Amino acid sequence: MANKKIYCGSGKQKTETWLKITVNPDKLMEYVQEYEGRRFVKLDINLLPEPNQFGKDVEVTVDTWQPTQKKDQVEVTKDDSDLPF
């Protein structure tokens, strides 16, 4: 899934430092993540080299990158039930 682009919006570059975008929330629902009780969606906002057929020069896609866990990586847990004597 990391290589597939999920388009969720577009926009226009208004000035050198200001981008104005519109995002479709229906396309984001399955990509909502939770961290420390807060929900969020990671997005990539890219300037296009030239405007598309609708005059939009900004592309908004969902960032689907996920870290891969190594096969030899083992989760270590502390077992406090074992007495040292």
Image: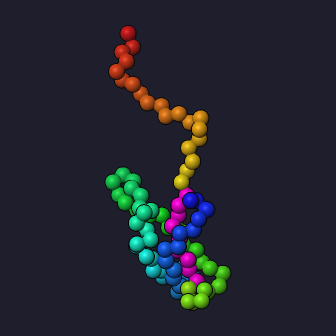
The relative height of residue 7 versus residue 53 in the rendered view (above or below) is above
Snapshot quadrant of residue 65: bottom right
The residue at the point 40 percent across, 72 percent down is 26
The relative height of residue 23 versus residue 62 in the rendered view (above or below) is below
Which colour style is shown?
Answer: rainbow
Q: Position of residue 34 (x, y in %)?
A: 39, 55
Q: Is residue 15 visible?
A: no
* Farthest residue, direction top: 85
Foreground: 5 or 35? 5
Q: In which quarter of the image is the N terminus?
A: bottom right
Q: Position of residue 68 (x, y in %)?
A: 57, 48
- Determine whether, in the image, residue 40 is placed left or right of residue 48: left
Q: Position of residue 21 (x, y in %)?
A: 48, 80
Q: Which region shows up in magenta?
A: 57-65
Is 60 colored magenta in this rendering?
Answer: yes
The residue at the point 39 percent across, 14 percent down is 84
Q: Is residue 57 visible?
A: yes
Snapshot quadrant of residue 44: bottom right
The residue at the point 56 percent across, 36 percent down is 73
Q: Quadrant of the C terminus?
A: top left
Is 66 colored magenta in this rendering?
Answer: no
Snapshot quadrant of residue 80: top left
